[in-house]
Image: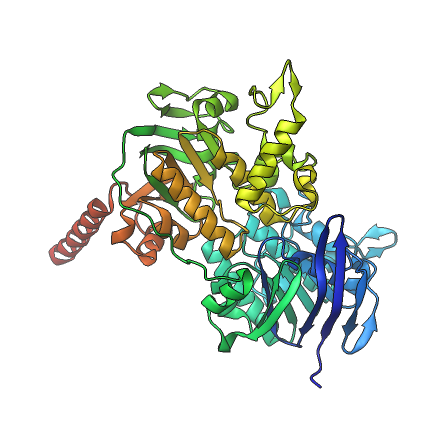
Amino acid sequence: MEEYVIEMRHITKRFPGVLANDDITLCLKKGEIHALLGENGAGKSTLMSVLFGLYQPEKGEIRKNGRTVKINNPNDANRLGIGMVHQHFKLVENFTVLENVMLGMESCRFGFLDRTEAEQRVRELSERYHLQVNPDALVEKISVGMQQRVEILKMLYRDNEILIFDEPTAVLAPQEIGELLQIMKGFAAEGKSILFITHKLGEIMAVADRCTVLCKGKYIGTVEIEKTTREELSRMMVGREVQLTVEKQEQSAGEEVLSVEKLTVAAKHGKKPAVHNVSFSVRSGEIVGIAGIEGNGQTELVYALTGLLPVAKGKLILRGKDITKASVRERSLAGISHIPEDRHRHGLVLDFSLAENMVLRRYREPEFAKYGFLKKDAMEEYANRLIARFDVRSGSGADTVVRSMSGGNQQKAVIAREVDREHTLLAAVQPTRGLDVGAIEFVQRELVECREKGNAVLLVSLELEEILNVSDRILVMYEGEIVGEFDPKKTTAQELGYYMAGAKQTGGTAKEQTGKKQENKSLEASGKEEG
């Protein structure tokens, strides 16, 4: 019988109205990267939370190196060498990197916190594993990718040998994803064992040794990656064939819906503006995709468009009306729908019910309110309709507290609310972040359907495949400026990556930029000849 470093045998976990894990068995070998795949709400995070001691199963047992163990809480898990990077990081934002890593493992000398030894160890770990994190930096002032590295350092600082990554790439830029996958390979080469929850089939094919698939809380099977395909994994996960590319009809764009004129938005930190002198338009019946590495002004651009940040200079025109100084509510009533990149901060009220969240934009309308009082029955009926249409899985239907739902189903709730309401412009930022392939297929079809209904869609995504797949036009942002415009049929991910990395920083269409590039080369060559 093959020896496993971790065995989860016949695990069953229930919540009110939901059987999250139904008799699941998962075995992890030493030194392997084992992917855990399944639809949103399939029970993946719940299963890993059982292993980490956050939940107690009703049935089943956990074995470590063949010996049955009881994991009552995360402290027990850490003592057994089990660490976890959660989908939503568990960091204290106003603490430094070092303070976050030490938290719960503080060493003292003569009654005082001994930071010197801890800092030396953090620097050693950071250098050894190529994590490159400054121990003195405040967590609130470092990028999301760096925050994830802090979470990884927390595991290494505690000498964890079994590493759980819950959707680790969902919040990362493309280049950060590549770096993380290399870090994971390095851990495995050292003999550490990794459990890796993800929806991204490409990542599984790139780094995993084996993959276990769950569906609606049940175990479907475990396959060796060398002997399977992306299509087979998709079929196991959703029980049907999945279209990995979106089909859309050719159509001509209509009248101008949004005009952004020489927009400048100040940065939160530093003197250089986050968005500088940006101009573009979005017309009815078209999807304009904005590509760019995270932190190049896309967030601030959408915040300015939706009213979450003030405009320093320039104008925003929606259907001929100047909305530059309009409030968030006024923009909403004017027809802007917004799928935000941070669903917790700007998309949902986590302690409200699903029904209350579904009508956040519309609760003042006569359909849902009368004489200042909410119509609970109408809210519930509307929410149940969206739950069915968008396959939002929740334990108690419309009454479910949103905080208790999986991240993917929270995202589907936001998308359902924003897509269903009457709008002329849909600003969709990372709309498929954290979704499984079946849900991604559905959401991308909804975006195309919005376009076909004559609405304008502004799509901001870090996923180049999604940008190329869905967009009618592509704009690339670098350091707060638009550095190129592309036709998705006439460009490639490599060409877009060239502009995203800042190899070209002058505006214009792709054709114009190519001409300028050739012109620059000619000037350089003639300069050398003259020299």
User: How far from the left and from the top, in percent, is residue 250?
Assistant: 26, 45
Q: Residue at x 68, y 73 (%)?
A: 27
In the foreground, 396 or 233? 396
In this view of the protein, can residue 273 be seen by the observer?
A: no
In the foreground, 271 or 250? 250
Is residue 382 toward the left or the right of residue 466 in the image? right
User: How far from the left and from the top, in percent, is residue 342?
Assistant: 56, 41
In the foreground, 193 or 357? 357
Quarter of the image for residue 357 reads: top right
Quarter of the image for residue 116 reads: bottom right
Is 184 drawn above or below residue 332 in the view shown?
below
Colour mode of the rendering: rainbow
Quarter of the image for residue 506 reads: top left
Is residue 245 toward the left or the right of residue 104 in the image? left
Q: Residue at x 65, y 55 (%)?
A: 151
In the foreground, 343 or 110? 343
> Farthest top residue?
371
Query: Where's the N terminus, which quadrant?
Result: bottom right
Query: Where's the C terminus, which quadrant?
Result: bottom left
Is residue 398 toward the left or the right of residue 247 in the image? right
Is 29 drawn above or below residue 172 in the view shown?
below
Is residue 220 toward the left or the right of residue 429 in the image? right
> Farthest right residue?
110
User: How far from the left and from the top, in percent, is residue 495?
Assistant: 30, 55
Give the total number of marks visible in the rendering: 0
In this view of the protein, can residue 509 be seen by the observer?
A: yes
Is 466 drawn above or below residue 184 in the view shown?
above
User: How far from the left and from the top, in percent, is residue 243?
Assistant: 42, 58
Q: Residue at x 76, y 58 (%)?
A: 13
